[in-house]
Image: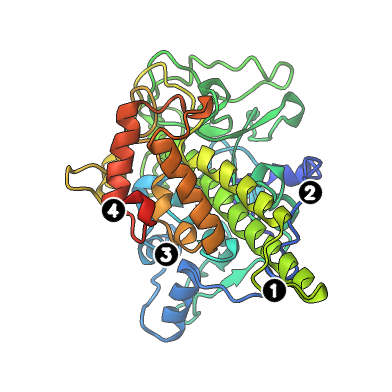
């Protein structure tokens, strides 16, 4: 089997490629040294599972209706409650996707699984601590074939045409897209598309998605199809505050009947946070590699760091800190809630301080999280950042939390917010610099 181009629908939904990637930006040369994205060894959740499969330590059972989906979710520790459904034809298996047969996406803190009814493959993307987002496919079990050994196939580079653009910070990554989608699921690209994260207005979110949950007076683009003659005039009222998706789509063929609103909001934050972490990683390694070459050529001391490298590291650190502290977050005008167990299950994970507080505690009244500092600060990808940039990021975060940095970009953080986040991190984040103590 040749590796098909993997595009996780909705999470970079493949219509980006249909736009010929005209939005591509000047990018880090991540296919060359020192990143060597295509050839460097990777060690992530998928490769670890593949090693267990190859060693016979785990068995992947296929089910009649969903193939390997259930087993893979369990083995990758991806919760069913994270299920979200996208109905726009904006993915690899577009023939399998429509408003009647949406595509399901599941995720945990570092891994994403895409599933289509009767699809040929499962689509997986996972965050590698060193190499950023890595894309895989897993061929679904064929009926009656109990002998095949599941094998994850890594994408050969086709995905990067669109999965490494300005929308992903110029590095291999993911994004959540919102489109005007017609009754057949076709995206009406001429009417505009939106890349969404925690800064996005509600009015621009979730076009081409099903959304189950309550959101008061706010309105979004989900749960409805657009008309080709006037795509922008979607019936937002018809798609608002839908708590039972079975009234608008058959959900019996999926693992759950939900496309949880809170899961969608967490997903939007998470994928872009991954991209900023990867950017900080790649940019720092690239700058350090350039210094190494120049130091050898100019016979400078091996540890010499150029002013340019310092600026590059400082620049990506600024971007990461702003995003991880939710600068520019859209202020909720009404409380929001989902319909699945996702909210409860999500908050159970991760460390808590002596007062019982966690960066995973959701607010859902005026903002997404109660303590606005990304929970992905605990992730392997963040903790594995090159020491130079990690130190700069932590210093900048500390400056914000202690009031040393009182710039308008962080005005959304009250004194109480800053103190609470500072206390949580002091107790729960390992290997903090001395200035944090």
Taking the image as shown, residue 257 lies to the left or right of residue 330, namely left
Residue carrying label 3: 72
Is the Cβ of the residue at disc 3 closer than 8 Å to that at disc 4? no
Between disc 4 and disc 2, whose residue precedes? 2
Which disc number belongs to residue 428? 4
- Secondary element at image label 1: loop
Residue carrying label 2: 26
Classify 10 Å Cα crowding around label 3: few (below 14), some (14-19), many (20 and above).
many
* Colour scheme shown: rainbow
Q: Nearer the viewer, mark 3 or mark 2?
A: 2
Q: How many marks?
A: 4
Q: Nearer the viewer, mark 1 or mark 4?
A: 1
- Above/below status of 146 relative to 198: below
Between disc 1 and disc 3, whose residue precedes? 3
Between disc 2 and disc 1, whose residue precedes? 2
Q: CA–CA distance between discs 3 and 2?
A: 36 Å
Q: CA–CA distance between discs 2 and 1?
A: 31 Å
Q: Nearer the viewer, mark 1 or mark 3?
A: 1
Residue carrying label 1: 301
Residue 327 screen position, x and y as percent: 50, 31
- Kindly identify the residue that appears in the image at 55 percent across and 60 percent down: 388
Residue 152 screen position, x and y as percent: 55, 71
């Amino acid at each position: 089997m040749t590796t098909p181009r993997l595009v996780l629908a909705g999470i970079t939904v493949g219509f980006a490629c249909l736009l010929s990637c005209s939005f591509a930006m000047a990018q880090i040369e991540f296919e060359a040294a020192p990143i060597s994205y295509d050839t460097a060894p990777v060690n992530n959740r998928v490769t670890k599972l593949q090693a267990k499969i190859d060693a016979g330590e785990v068995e992947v059972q296929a089910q009649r209706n969903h193939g390997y989906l259930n087993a893979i979710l369990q083995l990758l520790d991806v919760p069913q409650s994270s299920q979200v459904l996208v109905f726009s034809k904006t993915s690899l298996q577009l023939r399998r996707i429509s408003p009647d047969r949406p595509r399901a996406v599941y995720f945990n803190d570092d891994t994403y699984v895409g599933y289509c009814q009767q699809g040929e493959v499962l689509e997986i993307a996972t965050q590698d601590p060193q190499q950023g987002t890595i894309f895989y496919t897993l061929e679904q079990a064929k009926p009656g074939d109990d002998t095949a050994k599941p094998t994850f196939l890594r994408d050969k580079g086709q995905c990067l045409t669109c999965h490494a653009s300005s929308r992903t910070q110029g590095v291999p990554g993911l994004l959540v897209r919102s489109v005007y989608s017609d009754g057949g699921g076709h995206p009406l690209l001429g009417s505009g598309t939106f890349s969404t994260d925690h800064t996005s207005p509600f009015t621009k979110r979730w076009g081409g998605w099903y959304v189950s949950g309550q959101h008061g007076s706010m309105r979004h683009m989900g749960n409805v199809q657009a008309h080709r003659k006037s795509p922008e005039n979607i019936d937002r009222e018809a798609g608002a505050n839908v708590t039972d998706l079975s009234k608008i789509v058959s959900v019996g063929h999926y693992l759950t009947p939900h496309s949880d609103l809170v899961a969608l909001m967490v997903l939007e934050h998470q994928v872009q946070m991954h991209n900023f972490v990867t950017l900080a990683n790649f940019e720092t390694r690239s700058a350090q590699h350039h210094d190494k070459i120049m130091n050898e050529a100019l016979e400078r001391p091996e540890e010499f760091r150029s002013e340019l490298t310092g600026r590059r590291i400082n620049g990506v650190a600024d971007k990461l800190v702003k995003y991880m502290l939710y600068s520019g977050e859209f202020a909720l005008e009404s409380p929001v809630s989902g319909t699945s167990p996702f909210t409860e299950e999500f908050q159970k994970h991760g460390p808590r301080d002596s007062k019982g507080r966690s960066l995973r505690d959701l607010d859902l009244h005026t903002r997404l999280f109660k303590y606005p500092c990304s929970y992905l600060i605990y992730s392997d990808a963040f903790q594995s950042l090159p020491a130079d940039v990690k130190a700069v990021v932590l210093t900048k975060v500390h400056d914000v939390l202690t009031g040393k940095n009182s710039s308008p970009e962080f005005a959304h953080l009250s004194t109480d917010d800053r103190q609470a986040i500072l206390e949580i991190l002091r107790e729960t984040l390992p290997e903090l610099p001395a200035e944090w103590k």
